[in-house]
Image (cartoon, rainbow, N blue to C red):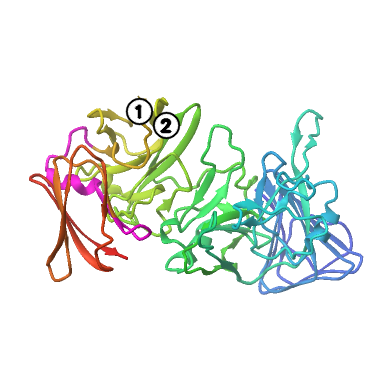
Amino acid sequence: MKRSTPLLSIITTAFCLPLFAQVSLEVASGGEMYVSPTAYVYVSSSGNVNINASGALIMDSVSDNYSDLYVDGASTGDAEYRHHTGTLTNTDLVSPPVSGQTFASFAINNAGKIPNGSITPANLKYGPLDKTTGAYVEYAATDATILGAGQGYRAGSVSVLDIDGTTQISQTLSYNGVISTEDVTIPITYSAGLPYKESNLIGNPFTTHVLSSALVAPMVGNAAINQSYAAIYGWQGSAGIRPDTWEIYNSMDTRLLTPGQGFIVIATPAGGSLVFPSAAREVSEFATQDNILTGRSSNSAPSSFELKLTKDSKESKSKLYFIDSHGTRGLDVTYDAGSLGSSIGTHLVEDSEGINFAIQVLSKGDLTATDYSIPLEVSVAAGQEATISIESLNVPLGTKFYLEDTALNTHTLLTSDSYTFTPSSTLSGIGRFYLRTTSSTFSNDSTALNSVEILSLASSKQLVIRGQLVNDSVLKLYDLRGRVIDSYELVASQTNHLIDVSNISSGVYIVNLNNKNQSKTTKLVIN
């Protein structure tokens, strides 16, 4: 357990004893207070913090421990937070734990500790994401930009030898600025037509850990946040065999994010803002509390498993959960989380909009239900050997999930075995692989179209029908008065159909897909 620090009033010497404060904290002129990486300070009962101009309040961290200072009231004066930061080759996403310092001042205080830029070598490897270029900014050492609360940056530290003198390790970068004690609002933007137009690099603005699910909660119904991606996406660093290096935090998470932790959130074209609630602040009492760069395991253990795609010794993963509440076959906002580029993922079982999900949450009943299938999106190059398997299996004894390969008409018990294949043509999207709880095709073929998606593309005014049809089919388009507007023939040999609807007026329509064995009706919008 971390050591607590209960009583702090006037400090005039170096200090890191465990105390709980029921009064305000005053760091006197000439005084210094030091909070070690394994300690925390809690200034409770609306107590305030005042740091005199010539006083020093220093919070420290190491690779797997970050100190906490929780202030229930207000804080005045500048504090210092020494934030452990990844190396040049394993860069971090960070956010100032204390804010208001210019980058030029920050660079002076950390002279020799920030490496030269990899994009602009004359500058330093520290800066925000530039959506115009899709690359990171690297600030000049003299840049006067203010390091603001909640803003996110990519950063690296110059590696140093460890205490044994044998291994290169990262080190801390020192921030000086004000302590945020109230809600922090950060702008969320969408830059149409630019690379990474929807990505926003932001971060924890507090000198405490924060409960990740409490940061995700304000995303529900927030018009600025894409509801299919209403989660926190944390960069895990150069993960070697993991090309999809995003650690995803959703509403199921009880994990804590460290002070100074940066991450990505995904915007809608509307843009707006996101509030970091001060109520999300928590003191980490655990012996170790690492940042996202290396990841941690969750404290809860619902029924779940990971789908893994291995190709050329590289691994991509997607996760499925099965829970009583918030687990449905449609979109569960802040529970389901879209993928940021993984080579394997799942599409929603119902009401899919063609999004590849890195996390999908279903009900516990779906562990054994036989009336549905889960479409898998898989990306593999032609002639490339790949293997689909399950790991981190945590389901009731006897639970079975089969992988159906519609191209070869095979079913593999994936909860026991892996499946290796080599596609003759480049494979992407859904249509070939489905996950089922039974090894046979649906006993009622009319339900099989649950695995077929019907989408409307606003960008090209096309309808997309993806998935395996049992027979040649007819798709009919109706207006809301029930009149047939047009009909289209689809062949079973194709798993992806594109239909031009540029001649159809914008509006809401009913689509019926039918053959002698299958039928599916859905509502969609043509823009």
| Mark with earlier residue (2, 1) | 2
Q: Is residue 90 left or right of residue 255?
A: right
Report crowding for label 2: few under 14, some 14 to 19, many 20 or more residues within 10 A (C-alpha): some
Label 2: which residue? 381
Q: Which residue is mark 1?
A: 423
Q: CA distance from mark 2 to mark 1?
A: 7 Å
Q: Residue at x 58, y 54 (%)?
A: 263
Q: Is residue 382 above or below residue 468?
A: above
Query: What amino acid is at disc 1?
Result: Pro
Image coordinates for residue 252, horizontal then vertical, percent: 44, 53
Instruction: Tell me the amino acid under the disc marked 2.
Output: Ala
* Depth order, front residue of 160/508: 508
In the image, 280: left or right of 13?
left
Which one is nearer the viewer's eye here, 185 or 29? 185
Q: Is residue 131 above or below residue 71?
A: above
425, 376: nearer the viewer: 425
In the image, 335 versus 192, the foreground residue is: 192
Residue range in magenta is 438-462
Q: Quadrant of residue 414?
A: top left
Q: Position of residue 102 (x, y in %)?
A: 79, 64
Where is residue 452 drawn, in percent x and y? 24, 47
Q: Residues within 10 Å of mark 1 (few under 14, many from 20)?
A: some
